Image: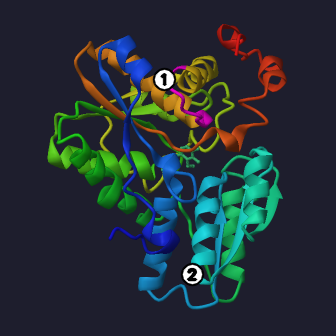
Amino acid sequence: MDIKDGFVGTVGNTPLIRLNSFSEETGCEILGKAEFLNPGGSVKDRAALYIIKDAEEKGKLKPGGTVVEGTAGNTGIGLAHICNAKGYKCLIIIPDTQSQEKIDLLRTLGAEVRTVPAVPYRDPNNYVKLSGRLAQEMENAIWANQFDNLANRRAHYETTGPEIWAQTDGKIDAWVAATGTGGTYAGVSLFLKEKNPDIKCIVADPMGSGLYSYVKTGEIHVEGSSITEGIGNSRITANMEGAPIDDAIQIDDKEAVRVIYQLLYEDGLFMGGSVGINVGAAVALAKQMGSGHTIVTVLCDGGARYQSRLFNQEWLAAKGLWPEHWQVK
Ligand code: PMP
């Protein structure tokens, strides 16, 4: 018998997928960890589960309690599912720049959702800071605090990293991923470097994020912006602190969109925007490293969450991002 124990028992153990068109193009094995196949539909199910389990184990989250979080969407979706499965309430603070699909889904899942204007982290009304204050003011509530709660990266150190190692038989030359909280990148990097310090760990960064300049110059410098959601950062989170970084690759939206459409029409994979940054960076890295290498990245979530944006010709065209090459479809 092979039966999973409810939602919680179904998180993780995702397949590692060879991205055929990109592998053939580059002569490298470009592999994607299929996190969109988690039961809540994204890589963040793992962090949400570890954060809730950690709070339970420490006695901070008691029956009937509320989990509060500021999230760009996927962490909230993971938390809302787990709260339903475990009998907790869920309050989500989300910037109003995030896709309507994610906001609607959170409400469908029964979370209380408050949308707030997207303001920088230094502003006291930033969604992350607001969620922390609200949690403090409430009875029997915890703040998930995904950016600085190390249970987040532990999820990836204890599960995603070992899965990738086992799935490749340890034959992996590089790991590349974009960072939101940094939990996925840091947890997997820390695990892989322990197994083999020669594995290159590379940060993929969208425009408008400060990590690329941080890696290249030691200073956080933010320029431009990106249509991708859930990634990019203008500070070093606790989850990113001490993470091994060998290099960084910056990918712009035009390339990310091209990659997303190639994944859709050549590989049959319907992926979200951050996957465009991740796979775009894996391809750029393959070109730098030369053929014959194995490069692993993350397929963070699926495309349905971005139907009204990434897969809407008018929306993309208005931003000058519609990839002409795919117009035939
Ligand atoms: N891609 C998407 C779509 C996400 O929602 C997130 C999480 N914000 C990430 C990538 C980055 O994951 P992490 O927080 O582990 O850095």
Q: Which residues are magenta?
A: 266-273
Say if disc 2 is inside 8 Å of ligand 1: no
CA distance for labels 2 and 1: 38 Å
Residue located 56% across and 69% down the image? 144
Percent x, y of residue 236: 48, 47
Q: Which residue is mark 2?
A: 86
**Mark 2, other Cα within 10 Å: few <14 / some 14–19 / many ≥20:** some
Numbered disc in front, either 2 or 1: 2
Tag 1 secondary structure: helix
Q: Does residue 87 lie above or below 316 as drawn?
A: below
The residue carrying pointer 1 sits among few (fewer than 14), some (14 to 19) or many (20 or more) residues within 10 Å by Cα, namely many
Residue, x 42% and y 49% (percent of image)? 184
Q: Are the residues flagged by discs 2 and 1 in contact, CB closer than 8 Å?
A: no
Marker disc for residue 280:
1
Q: Amino acid at mark 2?
A: Lys
- To which quarter of the image does residue 328 belong? top right
Give residue 67's mark: none
Query: What amino acid type is highlighted by mark number 1?
Result: Gly
Residue 57, by quadrant, is bottom left
| Vertical position of residue 59 compared to residue 133: above or below | below
Q: Position of residue 300 (x, y in %)?
A: 51, 43
Q: Can the viewer see residue 148? A: no
Q: According to the image, what is the colour scheme of the structure?
A: rainbow
Between discs 2 and 1, the one toward the N terminus: 2
